[in-house]
Image (tube, rainbow, N blue to C red):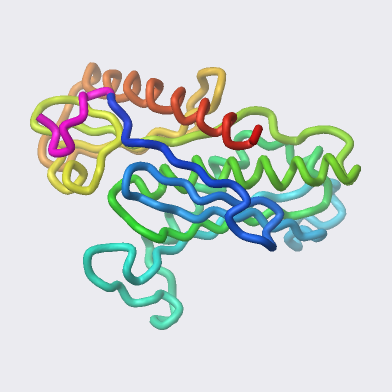
Amino acid sequence: MRPSGRAPDEMRAITIETAFTRHAEGSCLIGFGDTRVLCTASIEERTPPWLRGKGEGWVTAEYSMLPRATHTRGQREAAKGRQSGRTQEIQRLIGRSLRAVVDLKKLGERQITLDCDVIQADGGTRTAAISGAWIALRLAVDGLIESGALASDPIEAQVAAVSCGIYQGTPVLDLDYDEDSAADADANFVLISGGKIAEAQATAEGACYDEEGLLRLLRLARIGCDRIFAAQLNAVKK
């Protein structure tokens, strides 16, 4: 029995509120259960120095966790003067995931930055951030297309992410904190609509697993991401 009482292939409730902030070109507040992440997309008519004059753009991301997103207060990284290795790893993951579905040449010489700020954490913050960042990106690009700044859509597909793990010997979908902290193995899958895999992170924590165990986690991830894809489309059509 999962602590939440969910079935092994059952996601937590997905909630999405678009246009959550006034000034960002695209924004949403996404929730996977009690996890809440604010995702915003900011467009700048410039590119990083190494891309200047090359006729293509860039998509990047920044990630942070608010001090009381967790059970105890964490110190702001700005106050410490440096980002943690975890923060750097997650924001690079978000950036790679979004670039996997964007034609940077069609984007033109501009940069879109996705800011993902965790307001409340209960497991799956990076996967919620990726899934919400796509919505913010989609809304920002829609604005560019509507204004005539883009002649064609640079976003080629959807991207979403979900966590899976082996909890008390059973593969389960969408881990919350109670499961994640006690799982024998946990994995994060970043999937693209149409069936391709953008990234897979899988780690044995308490016990190793075999090939069939990995495939069972991937099959659960496909179930979860299909549900996220549907929620994303519903959100951006509103």
Give the image location of residue 126, x and y in percent: 41, 48
Q: Name the one closer to the observer, 227 or 201.
A: 227
Vertical relation: 228 (above or below) 22: above
Query: Does the image show residue 93?
Result: no
Which of the 4 quarters of the picture holds residue 143?
top right
**Picture layout, residue 112 above or below residue 189:** below
**Which residue is rendered at x = 28% and y = 26% of the image?**
10
The structure residue drawn at horizontal position 81% and vertical position 38%, both measured from the top left corner, is 106
Residue range corresponding to the magenta coloring: 1-9
What residue sits 35% from the left and 37% below the top?
A: 188
Q: Residue at the spot x=30%, y=72% of the render?
A: 74
In the figure, is residue 21 to the left or right of 32?
right
Please say whether residue 137 is visible from this viewpoint: yes
Side (left or right) of 137 relative to 94: right
Judged by its main secondary structure, the magenta piece is loop
Q: Is residue 174 above or below residue 196?
A: below
| Residue 168 spot, x, y in % from top left | 8, 32
Where does the N terminus fall, quadrant-wise? Answer: top left
52 in relation to 153, above or below: below
Is 7 colored magenta in this rendering? yes
Q: Quadrant of the C terminus?
A: top right
- Locate residue 181, reporting x and y percent: 17, 48
Q: Residue furthest front?
A: 238
Name the one closer to the observer, 22 or 116: 22
Horizontal side, residue 16 vs residue 40: left or right: left
Q: Is residue 151 magenta?
A: no
Q: Position of residue 207 (x, y in %)?
A: 11, 35
Numbered circles on residues, count: 0
